[in-house]
Amino acid sequence: MSSSDRTPEAPENPQAAAQDWQRWHEQRVETVSSPYGPLSLTGTHWLADHPDGRIDGVPGRWKDAGTEVVLSAGEADGISVDGEPFVGEVALGPDRGPIPASRVFVGERRLVVLTREGLWAVRDFDPASAARRAFAGIEAGAYDPAWVLAGRFVPYEESRTVQVENADGRARGLGLAGQVFFTHEGAEHALHVAVEEDGSLWAVLADAGSGKSSYRFRFLRPAAPEADGSVTVDFNRTLLPPCAFADHFICPFPPPGNTLPFTVPVGELNKR
């Protein structure tokens, strides 16, 4: 997620806050529907499932070499590496930059090398994907200042990792660094959160409406807490996870304790 997805401090002027949210929502729709946004992901191919190196629909031969991926390509594959037509064999590490800057591409498609917990995969991003062509927007609740809540971040004494199921059906470790406490309708609640490299927070959460009035789980990315731990919890900026837009993302499900007992009717609700 980009920095524009983070929850900013709430403006004091409600009208200005609503306008700011509208700009944020429009930017989110633009980002999601961009040529290499989440709608363009047509496959995540784990190389362990392809011991011969051949992936259906993906040109070249992709071999897991332990600390790297070795790509072999012939002229008929039509592969380019680092902006130049490629024939031969090349060792690849994980792509860490934006999707358009990935090293390997075939026409407009970008073939992105990914590693998770020692396993290698190739992701296929295609701007001509059916999901991108069919996209009609993001359903979101109307901005409501009542859902901008004062919170307090309390770090754990030591960071911890919990095993949670992911959208692809596999369990993986989710790193957590503390809890954000907030009050809703007179009752205190808390969300377990991770801390990103820039100090901002990330929560994977569900609520009483998840799977009914909204997608089965969502993300929330508050800005970095103040020195005293205070943080704004703006549920208006609750985000759909990437797997709401394409089935090939490996989004983590909410960790234990992150299912709220009430419905959150604001923020992003469903893909249209």
Image (cartoon, rainbow, N blue to C red):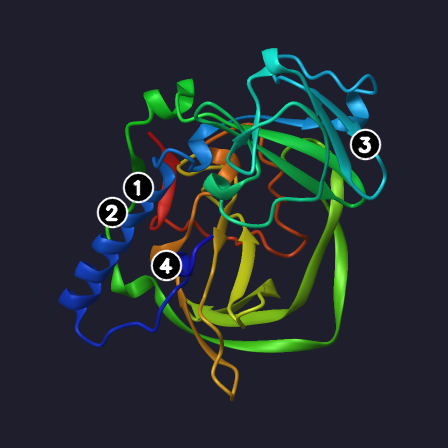
User: What's the residue type where badge 3 is placed?
Assistant: Asp
| Nearer mark to the viewer, of 3 and 2 | 3
Residue 100 visible in the snapshot: yes
Q: Is residue 118 left or right of residue 220?
A: right
Looking at marks 3 and 4 on the same chain, the residue that comes earlier in the sequence is marked by: 4
Residue 64: image tag: 3
User: What's the residue type where badge 1 is placed?
Assistant: Val
How crowded pointer 4 is (Cα within 10 Å; few <14, some 14-19, many 20+) is rated as few
Number of residue marks = 4
How crowded pointer 1 is (Cα within 10 Å; few <14, some 14-19, many 20+) is rated as some
Percent of width and height locating residue 269:
38, 41
Q: Quadrant of the C terminus?
A: top left
**Residue underneath mark 4:** 4
The image quadrant that residue 214 belongs to is top left
**48 or 76: nearer the eye?**
76
The image quadrant that residue 162 belongs to is bottom right
Q: CA distance from mark 1 to mark 4?
A: 12 Å
User: What's the residue type where badge 2 is placed?
Assistant: Glu
User: What's the residue type where badge 4 is placed?
Assistant: Ser
The residue located at (34%, 73%) in the rendering is 9
**Residue underneath mark 1:** 29
Residue 166 visible in the snapshot: no
Decide: marks 4, 2 in contact (CB < 8 A)? no
The residue lying furthest to the bottom in this view is 228
Q: Is residue 79 left or right of residue 72?
A: left
**168 or 112: nearer the eye?**
112
Which element carries disc 2, helix, strand or loop?
helix
Looking at marks 1 and 3 on the same chain, the residue that comes earlier in the sequence is marked by: 1
**Residue underneath mark 2:** 26
How crowded pointer 2 is (Cα within 10 Å; few <14, some 14-19, many 20+) is rated as few
